[in-house]
Amino acid sequence: SLVAYMTGITEVNALQPHYRCPKCKYSDFNEYGCLNGFDLPDKECPVCGEMLVKDGIDIPFETFLGFNGDKEPDIDLNFSGEYQAKAHRYTEVIFGKGTTFKAGTIGTIADKTAFGYVKKYFEEKNMHVNKAEIVRISKGCTGIKRTTGQHPGGIIVVPKGREIYEFCPAQHPADDSESDIITTHFDYHSIDQNLLKLDILGHDDPTVIRMLQDITGVDPKAIPMDDKETMSLFSSTKALGVTPQQINSKVGTYGVPEFGTKFVRGMLLDTMPQTFSDLLCISGLSHGTDVWLGNAKNLIDEGIVQSISEAVCTRDDIMVYLIRKGLPPNSAFKIMETVRKGKALKDPKWSEYEELMRSNDVPEWYIDSCKKIKYMFPKAHAAAYVMMAFRIAWFKVHIPEAYYAAYFSIRAKAFDAEFMIYGKEKVKEKMKEIELQGNEAANKDKDMYDDLELVLEMYERGLKFLPVDLYKSHSSKFIVEDEGLRPPFTSISGMGNVAAEGIYAAVRNGEELKSVDDLRKRAKIGNAVVDLLKKFNCLNSLPESDQLSFFDAI
């Protein structure tokens, strides 16, 4: 909403695409045929000559509260994962002690689990029944409450002067009465229409952007959202200075949030985005359920839809499109709400909605597309995620050493110095080894393969890793040096965070290390960790023991 933007809660400007002058405050809201403010052509202020700021994502306020103010607002706040716990505690400061509670969840028995329970029961009783009977009984077990949990970011807020017990019971997680966390006992979906729920989520993207700012000194908010080289990353590898054959990808989005997975890279090749508006559409399509595959993709492949922006991509698109077609705003809003929840075929009023759309010349392909959708992503979420992703992509193009240092420090899941810091041939060899395993590859190897793709790309761009060094390496962060990236101690497989931090602190406590034994004592590490450091030649300059040999003294 505009209120959230003006108060600094969000950087997503919900107004229509527009120009504004940062100097004399001139503004221009004329229609220029762009779906998004960032896609407007550059323009100078006609009053003072300053370059105009381009902004406006075009999100109707009614998607937030409804046309009659009868929709519960849903507020999602993305914090760095490092600060999420602090943000949760701060809600108690804002709203008052005893008014905020973690949103509870109910874990139920899934169909496959139920099948396993029933099958095991008959096996233990030595009873022989056919599969159909097991399926029949397991259906009765499916959906039964199994356990309680807590939402990863949900905070329920109780109005002042009211008690949580007026709405639902409360409990400690795992019945641990010593815990300072209290959750709602009912599933939050059963009470979210009566109480405000804040989603205070932990995200890697803000952490990455903060690290990039610390390394480079570049203000992320000053990064232009229409940078041509960065935009080209989503349709080619040219901006990286490599060929598709070198990195095994026709687009350059490895490691770019929202756009780095194999699935979304395939979407990029199908759509070849050229504008920020296209990226918003792809974000909406990739987060939705039954929105892209078997739906929008088919419409594009068959030529029914000429561009991605014509398809149903985010929930807001439905309401805006239907209002433009002439439907009453309230009806357009209700259709959007029905479709986004995947209830089109279940809602008894859907036949009325279909007739209303047909009477306003809404094409059949559009109506059919709405009926297939199970879940739709909001445009505001898509905009926030794409803006963060675009900034990170800008660093990847223009300051690559900082980008790779931040990625490997924060987002890499299975970085292993043994296979990654000794040149691209060793990287290719390991990738080939994992490829040959196919679906049999362990999850850790699959995660490592994702990291290897980024490592290979980095090598192909002319960057390199430096050796792990006892005196120069950080405990957990990759450091940018003139000659390359210095890996941290945690990049060594088998090196835990506690041991890495102990080594880092021991080296920097002011006293010079005398020997390996001295390091072992100061860092409080065992022989296994010492062996890992020796494997990477980190201890070559240190004698093994503090004790002088008789022969050394002669």
Image (cartoon, rainbow, N blue to C red):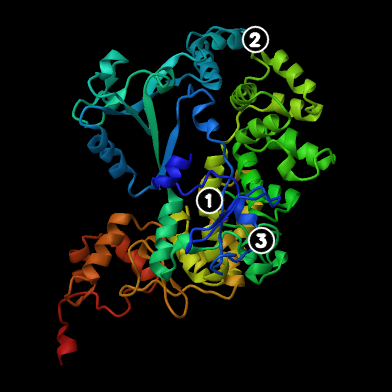
Crowd around label 1: few <14 · some 14–19 · many ≥20 (10 Å): some
Q: Is residue 291 above or below residue 551?
A: above
The residue mark sitting in front, 2 or 3, is 3
Mark 3 vs mark 1: which is more N-terminal?
A: 3
Q: Which residue is nearer to you in this view: 429 or 311?
A: 311
Q: Amino acid at mark 1?
A: Asp
Q: Which residue carries the number 1 mark?
A: 447
The answer to whether residue 492 shows anywhere in this view is no
Q: Secondary structure at mark 2?
A: helix
Mark 3 → mark 1, Cα distance in angstroms: 41 Å
Residue 28 image offset from top left, x and y in percent:
59, 54
Crowd around label 2: few <14 · some 14–19 · many ≥20 (10 Å): few
Residue drawn at (36%, 74%) of the image: 469
The residue mark sitting in front, 3 or 1, is 3
Mark 1 vs mark 2: which is more N-terminal?
A: 2
Residue drawn at (32%, 22%) of the image: 184
Please identify the quarter of the rendering in which residue 165 is found: top left
Residue 146 image offset from top left, x and y in percent:
41, 18
Q: Which residue carries the number 3 mark?
A: 41
Q: Is residue 520 above or below residue 361?
A: below
Q: Secondary structure at mark 3?
A: loop
Residue 441 image offset from top left, x and y in percent:
58, 47
